[in-house]
Image: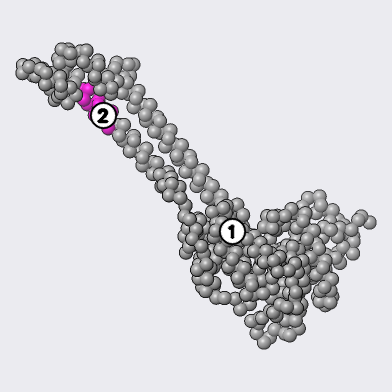
Amino acid sequence: MNRARSETLAQSAAETELELITQAQQGDRRAFGELVRCHREGVVNVVYRLCGDVNLAEDAAQEAFIRAWQHLTSYRPRSPFRNWVYRIATNVALDSLRRERETVDIDALPLATSDEGPEATVESKERGERVRQAVLALPSASRAVLVLREYEGLSYREIADTLDIPIGTVMSRLNYARNRLRQSLAPYLEVL
Amino acid sequence: MTQHVTAWLGAYHDGELQGLRLRQVEAHLAHCATCRADLESLRALAALLQENPAAANLTPPERFVAQVGLRLPRRPERPAWQRGLEIGWQLVPLGLLGAWTFVQAVLVVAGVVLLALQMGLGGDVMAGLWYPELVEGLSAPQQGLSLSEIFNLSEASLNDVGPLMLQLLSHRGPLGWGFTLNLVLTGVIGLLYWSWLASWWARRQHRQRQVQQHIRHLHKLNS
């Protein structure tokens, strides 16, 4: 019963999104606004994890949505709309990072702010911050692969399509990123 | 002991291995403590990475959408000819129905006219309609004659200037030209309609496939 209900809801959501995409492709700004609303958080987070700055992430996310709007007629629903926008957002973020510097100067980045309540321990916050900095210290190419895999759950094929690289490169970059992180986060991994 | 499978552990952890490679890695893991420890370390790293906080203090959704909306450049809408083509495509069945109705109406009217002519009814009117110059050239007693009688008077004129439809319909084939013409035109219109219907069905199926694909993607994302 619940399964049937969830399938119906999923079908309805998919049809709604496809309908919004079709309308936006025909120039409907309101429909595109709905798509932006649905994917805003995911896109901002992808860019945030790539560049480490909320303001920069929001600017890049807006830029990504604007590019998406400009190229919307070329989108075909063979791949999820979310992945298509991620692809644009990743390229925007990597472009801006490339322009500035190859690797982020993590000391210059603002500390992440959190809305966690008083129950969140200082230790947990510190660990989270250390993880964030370790991720940001990765080379941008490996970071992009890691973010799409670990935080957005994309498959290797989807990552390859998103970044326009071979699957073998996805695997090697992911292995490299994980090995680097295992070294830099070794003290925290031992505790776990 | 077989060679370590370190290079494949990441893909194994991500569920990306299949077939022979998957079985090789599983078989190796069953008896290699080093690789099992490596896999555990990957799992621990994945758990630790989730402690990286997501972006906080984001711009409220409404404001973000409004800001994007303000920065959206004007994108040319679909060209008018494309929209016209789409509307035209939707109206094809109506057009075909209209064409079929028109053909039937023409054939029925022509049939009635022919029947009337064969029965010698309304000869003057018909003659006046089709051959006014012929009727005007007739003397008063002759104007009372039926069309067939007039045609007898001027058979050459009929052969030269008679309406094509009338000639076709009055031709004595095995079933008559009218019937054949009706059959051919109805067949062509029917064929066009079925082609349109097949195209409509294919488009609908394509759309449903897209929806199903989208649902699979959403399921995958949710899981």
Is B115 magenta? The answer is yes
In the displayed structure, does residue B171 sit left or right of residue A146?
A: left
Does the magenta-highlighted stretch encompass residue B151? Answer: no
The mark lying in front, picked from 2 and 1, is: 1
Q: Which numbered disc covers residue A81?
A: 1
Q: How is the image coloured?
A: one colour
Residue B105, located in which quarter of the rendered image?
A: top left
Image marks 2 and 1: residues in contact by CB distance under 8 Å:
no
Evaluate whether residue A5 shows in this view: no
Q: Quadrant of residue B4?
A: bottom right
Going 52% across and 67% down the picture, which residue do you hit?
A: B71
Residue type, mark 2 in image: Val
Residue B100 — which label? none
Write the residue at 32% across / 16% down. B173
> Residue B8, how many percent across, how many down?
82, 57
Height in image: B161 above or below A108? above
Q: Residue at x 66, y 61 (%)?
A: A91
The percent coordinates of residue A68 (x first, y second) are: 57, 60
Q: Residue furthest bottom?
A: A118
Vertical side of B168 occupied by A60: above or below: below
Three-letter amino acid code of the residue under disc 1 = Phe
Q: Looking at the picture, does residue B42 appear above or below residue A27? A: below
- Residue numbers of the magenta segment: B105-116
Q: Is residue A123 visible?
A: yes
Q: Position of residue B82 (x, y in %)?
A: 45, 47
Residue A146 coordinates in the image, percent (x, y): 74, 65
Q: Main secondary structure of the magenta part?
A: helix
Image mark 2: chain: B
Residue tagged 2: B108
